[in-house]
Image (tube, rainbow, N blue to C red):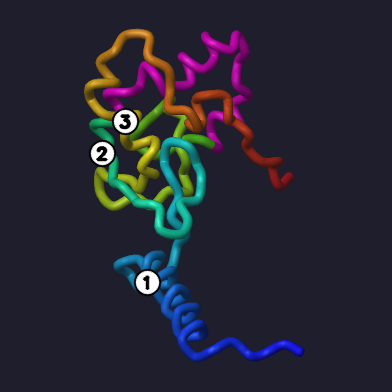
Amino acid sequence: TLNPPDENFKKSLVMKAIKQAIRTKRPNGTHQVKVCVVCDRVIIGEEKVCNISTERLEENQHRISVDVYEEFYRKTLHPLLVEQYSVEGLDRLLLSPRAYREGDNFECCQSCNSSMQPSKAKKKGSKPPKYAIANGFVIGHFPLS
C-alpha cells in the first residue's frame, strides 16, 4: 500500500511552486518564462538569471552576428530565419525575441553571460558561447501561412 506524502513534503512542493511562479512574474503583473537572449534556452529551476546590456551584445557582434554565422558555416541564412532571431534595435545579431527586455537589458543565462564578458569579447576570432543561436543553433519555426 502507498502512504500519502507527509505534510513537510507537501509544504516543500507548494513552496517550490510558489517560488517558480514568483520568479516568472513581471512588473506589469503578467508571467513570462525566463529565456536567454543569446541561446534561446529556457532558464529553469534555480539557475541564475543574469542581465546583459545591448552595449555588451553589440561588443560581441563579431561572435553572434548573421554575417559571422554565414561566413563560418558558408551558408546564407534564409531571411525568415534571420527575422525569427531578430531583436529590435540590434540588427543582424542572432538573438532570441522571446527573452524578456527591460529598457536596454535582456535576461541571459549564466553560461552565456560569462561567455559574453568584455575580456572574451575583445579576443579576436573568439567563438560564440557554447549554446548560442549563432553557434549553429539556428532552428526557427515554420511560417503560419
Corner quadrant of residue 57? top left
Are discs 2 and 3 less than 8 Å apart at CB? yes
Tag 2's secondary structure?
Answer: strand
By secondary structure, the bulk of the magenta-drawn segment is best described as helix
On screen, residue 73 above or below 51: above
Q: Nearer the viewer, residue 143 or 56?
A: 56
Quadrant of the snapshot with the C terminus? top right
Name the residue at 43% across, 27% down: 129
Mark 2 Cα-neighbour bin, 10 Å: few <14, some 14–19, many ≥20? some
Report whether 134 appears left or right of 79: left
Report whether 5 appears left or right of 104: right
Are discs 2 and 1 less than 8 Å apart at CB? no
Mark 1 Cα-neighbour bin, 10 Å: few <14, some 14–19, many ≥20? few
Please give the residue where the numbered disc 3 appears in the rendered image.
57
Residue 43: x percent and y percent? 45, 51
Mark 2 vs mark 1: give the one in front.
1
Q: Earlier in the sequence, mark 3 or mark 1?
A: 1
Marker disc for residue 53: 2
Marker disc for residue 73: none
Residue 141: x percent and y percent? 66, 41
Instruction: Name the kind of residue labelled 2 in the image.
Output: Ser
Tag 3's secondary structure?
Answer: helix
Quadrant of the snapshot with the N terminus? bottom right
On screen, residue 136 above or below 103: above
Instruction: Name the kind of residue labelled 1 in the image.
Output: Ile
Q: How many marks?
A: 3
Q: Which residues are magenta?
A: 57-84
Residue 59 counted in the magenta span: yes
Residue 73 counted in the magenta span: yes
Mark 3 vs mark 1: give the one in front.
1
3D distance between C-alphas at marks 2 and 3: 6 Å
Marker disc for residue 22: 1
